[in-house]
Image (cartoon, grey):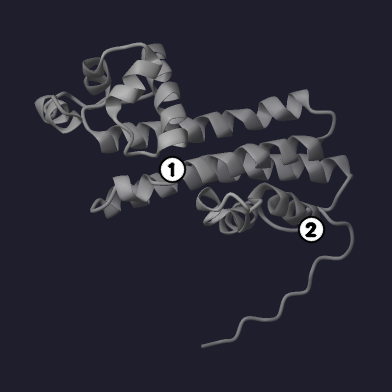
Amino acid sequence: MTDAQIEQSHGEQPKQVGRPRRSQQALLDAAAAVFVNSGVDAPVREIAARAGVGVGTIYRHFPTRPELVVAVYRHQVEACADAGQRLLAESATPELALRSWVSLFVEFLITKHGLAGALQGDSAGADALHSYFVDRLVPVCGSLLGAVRQSETAAAQVDAYNVLKGIGNLCIGAAHDPRYRAGTLVQLFISGVLAHGSPVQLPAEESG
């Protein structure tokens, strides 16, 4: 039986809500690892083999591939969000915590490629997921930038939303170009964000 046939046979299973249970977490970890190596179109049997379960178990938790992809995406967002405070506690300085967190964020951006294709035709779902991404990660970045400001080791001059937006732009296409060192460029960008001195003077926006 193909993945598509199994998916159809489980199509009426109820959707999972709330935070994943521990068994689901293990499946999501396995799926995330497979997606990184093989993309979001990887066979479900590959995910099941990595998780050490049967294919039917995957579909009992996630009846369709888009649901699995979205669950993996949310799982990775939560892991990235949770890492903020942990890195602040473990790192020697707030700046090192910020830079370590940014590296995790870059890895997340590069390895989540294929999500848009998996959600093709569901613009509302894609928009909701983007809002979730922004709502969870902008405050984490803001908290790290605030800690850097308070440490007086640097003068962060850009708000968290624009920092994440800038990082995202630097990561475009990185997954498909092995010569492109997005992480290096992003760290240089962070150096600029944290540079001492007067804020950069931007030209006034033209009125239309």
Report the amino acid beneath label 1.
Tyr
Q: Which residue is mark 1?
A: 132
In the picture, measured across the screen, residue 138 lies left or right of residue 72, that is right
Q: Position of residue 181 (x, y in %)?
A: 66, 51
At a point 47% along the width and 35% down the height, the residue shown is 36
Q: Position of residue 22 (x, y in %)?
A: 41, 13
Report the amino acid beneath label 2.
Gly
Quadrant for the N terminus in the image: top left
In primary-sequence order, the first of circles 2 and 1 is: 1
From mark 2 to mark 1, how far is it between C-alphas?
28 Å
Q: Secondary structure at mark 1?
A: helix
Taking depth in this image into account, of 94 and 118 the one nearest to the observer is 118
Q: Which residue is mark 2?
A: 192
Q: Relative to 44, does residue 171 appear above or below in the rendering?
A: below
Q: Position of residue 73 (x, y in %)?
A: 42, 36
At a point 40% along the width and 32% down the height, the residue shown is 72
